[in-house]
Amino acid sequence: MAKTRKIAVIVGSLRKESYSRKLAKAIATVAPANLQFDFVDIGQLQHFNQDLEATPTAEWTAFRDQVRGADAVLFVTPEYNRGLPGVLKNAIDVGSRPYGHSVWNGKPAAVVSNSPGAIGGFGAYHQLRQSLVFLNMPTVNQPETYVGGVAQMFDESGELINEASREFLAGFAQTFADGIEKHVA
Ligand code: FNR
């Protein structure tokens, strides 16, 4: 049986009814059973300030510990103004410091962007991936996961309506799981 792998899920929206969060939950339901998804909150993180590196806040430390304890990271994010939501970039920055102690280093990752619109958050996806390259996170390339029309994907209880979406997300999650095995000892 495949070994359990802990996935830190980071959602780039703080909105209660966030489609990104619904999408992340949907991915967790169709993923291989050995992937254990733990949602990591980022809304409570103070703005990154390099002056606080020697005296990190309790929230920063808890966040860093949560990510450090995961085998891999799944980012699910909306696009804000053709880029990354600030709250997600802040979380990336908090996790990346102090210099030489980044919690992201070497962790397998996957990015899923989404939007009610047709372009599916393409800009946010690639802006995030630019940082993941620098942070040395081997990331799923294919399938590309820009999910458009996300507002039409769920029923009232947050279940996926469409079989094609379910299949696509299940295939993506399997690819992520396979990639994790290549990078995690
Ligand atoms: C948006 N939205 C948006 N959508 C998009 O496809 N491209 C964009 O550049 C933007 N820009 C943008 C900026 C700001 C400040 C907001 C608040 C919204 C719309 C966005 O996709 C929509 O509100 C989603 O529902 C946000 O994701 P969650 O919160 O549902 O996960």
Image (cartoon, rainbow, N blue to C red):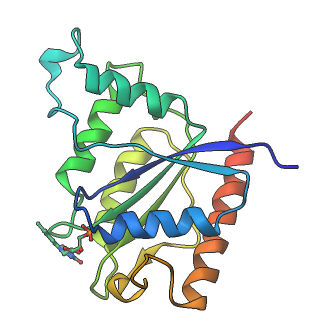
Point 67% across, 48% down: residue: 180
Question: What x and y, as percent, mark residue 76?
Answer: 40, 60
Ligand 1: give its quadrant.
bottom left
Report whether 58 appears left or right of 178. Answer: left
Towards the viewer: 49 or 14: 14
User: Which residue occupies the extreme top position in the image?
Assistant: 54
Count of residue discs? 0
Residue 41: which quarter of the image? top left
- Residue most extreme to the right: 1
Residue located 26% across and 59% down the image: 13
Q: Residue at x 30, y 56 (%)?
A: 12
Instruction: From the viewer's side, name the closer residue of 132 and 61.
Output: 61
> Which residue of the protein is positioned furthest toward the front in this rendering?
157
Q: Position of residue 100 (x, y in %)?
A: 41, 19
Question: Which quadrant would residue 177 be assigned to in this image?
Answer: bottom right
**Eyeballing the image, is 139 above or below 160?**
above
Q: Is residue 181 left or right of residue 113?
A: right
Q: Is residue 113 left or right of residue 80?
A: right
Q: Is residue 117 above or below residue 126?
A: below
Q: Position of residue 21 (x, y in %)?
A: 37, 63
**Residue 70 versus residue 139: which sits nearer the camera?**
70
Classify 183 as above or below 60: below
Q: How far across and how far down the image is residue 120, in percent?
A: 34, 79
**Res. 95 image quadrant:** top left
Q: Quadrant of the C terminus?
A: top right
In-front residue for pair 73/82: 73
| Residue sitting at x 16%, y 32% | 46
